[in-house]
Structures are given as C-alpha cells and as structure tokens.
Image (cartoon, helix red, strand yellow):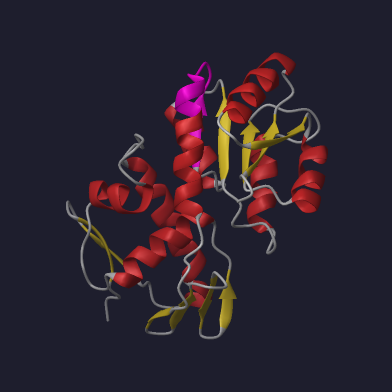
Amino acid sequence: MTQPLILIVEDEAALVTLLRYNLEREGFRVLEAGNGEEALLLIKEQRPDLVLLDWMLPILSGIEICRQIRRSPEHRLTPVIMLTARGEEADKLRGLEVGADDYVTKPFSPSELVARVRAVLRRAKPQPQGETLSYRDLTMDLITHRVRRTGREIHLGPTEFRLLKFLMENQGRVFSREQLLDSVWGRDIYVEPRTVDVHIRRLRKAINIDGAADLVRTVRSAGYALDAED
C-alpha cells in the first residue's frame, strides 16, 4: 500500500528538516514547499494526502493558502493542519474559520504532531461502501463526496463533510459539543469544544443557500441536531 504523502509548507529550514525526519521515520512520504505559490503548485500537481501549513509564509500567508484550498473544487477535501507560533484563541478560531482541520502551536512535540497527522488522515479516509444519505432537499453521496441541495452542489471542507455525514446518519437527535467531538473528531487527540461551534457555523453557511430553511437546529445548553424548524 502506498504511504500517505504529506506536504510541508514551511520556510524555516531547521523545522522542515525536523518534520521530514519524524514523518519519514513513521513511514510517510514527504514533499516540501518554502512559500505559498510553490505550495499551491505542488498541491495541484502532486495531490498530497495532507498539508502541514505554516501561518507566516512569504508571498502568501498560510491563511490565504488554506482559503484557496477550500475554494478549489478539486482539492477542497484535502486535510490541512496549521502550524504556527500564534497561540491566542482568536488566532486558532481564525485558522479553523478558513478551513483548517487542526491547529498545532509551536513549539510542539514531534510525536504529538505525528499523532495528529494520523488522526486527521483517519478522519479524512473515504467511505468504502456505496451509499447516499438524504434529508429533505439535501443529499450526500459518500462515494463521490458530493453534497447537493435542491440539485445545486455545495462545497464543504473535510471536517464539515464528516460533521454533516454524522448528523445525517442521526437525523433529529441532539448531540452535545463533547459528543460531536468524540464522534466526528475522535477521542485520540484533544480538540477544544468551541471548535464545534466554528464548524457548525461554516456548515450552516454552506448548506443554507439562497435563503433556504436552516437545517441545523441549535438546542440551548444541549447541542445541535439536523432537524429543521418548520
């Protein structure tokens, strides 16, 4: 089996060397890009399985690169982990808002980073079975990873796709932030509960198109459900 290909987008040579060593030791294949333009070209040509993306980069920032990945119909499901010295909560939320799947603050443990890479890759693994989920005028094809509402295609990032899939599989049930974190993100790494709110907002914005009814219900002090309020 071909090992996952990881693209490191980082302009600090010593950190690139450290990341490459630890990733290759764990069996991953590794690509490097020192700036945003090179990164976008490699994403297009090499189609990496995951991008490790530094926030502060020459030419294009990591935030802008992540935004362009999520806007691309061809690459929007590529998992992205942001690497940055910015540890403030507002910065973390900004990274998640533009589509990052995870966020690691420098300095970090190489073993922790590898664990996060494995966790994100597991979550992003395509479903092997052929299946279509539907709720009202919303449909999800688990083979092609396409989501449509009233026939119009909706572009979702990988985390929003998994979140919507879970909610569609459990229509009408209310899940707390903690339950969603365990079911969608997994129990193997720590993710802040507020992360759920960020992704719910992004999911709502994506699927509630053209003034359509809001399909995600917020239950105060309880959580969220796929359950439109008529």
- Which residue occupies the foreground of this view, 182 or 154? 182
Q: In the rendered view, tell whether residue 165 sits above or below residue 92.
A: below
Q: In this view of the protein, can residue 59 be seen by the observer?
A: yes
- Which residue occupies the foreground of this view, 216 or 14? 14
- Which residue occupies the foreground of this view, 73 or 132? 132
Answer whether residue 16 is magenta in the image. no
Where residue 77 appears, x then y in whole percent?
59, 57
Residue drawn where x is 79% and y is 44% of the image: 42
- Give the residue furthest to the left: 221
The span picked out in magenta is 102-113
- Which residue occupies the foreground of this view, 32 or 221? 32
User: Residue 36's image quarter?
Assistant: top right
Where residue 128 appears, x then y in whole percent?
48, 68
Where residue 164 appears, x then y in whole percent?
40, 65
Answer whether residue 108 is magenta in the image. yes
Q: In the rendered view, tell whether residue 114 sits above or below residue 85.
A: below
- Give the residue furthest to the front: 1
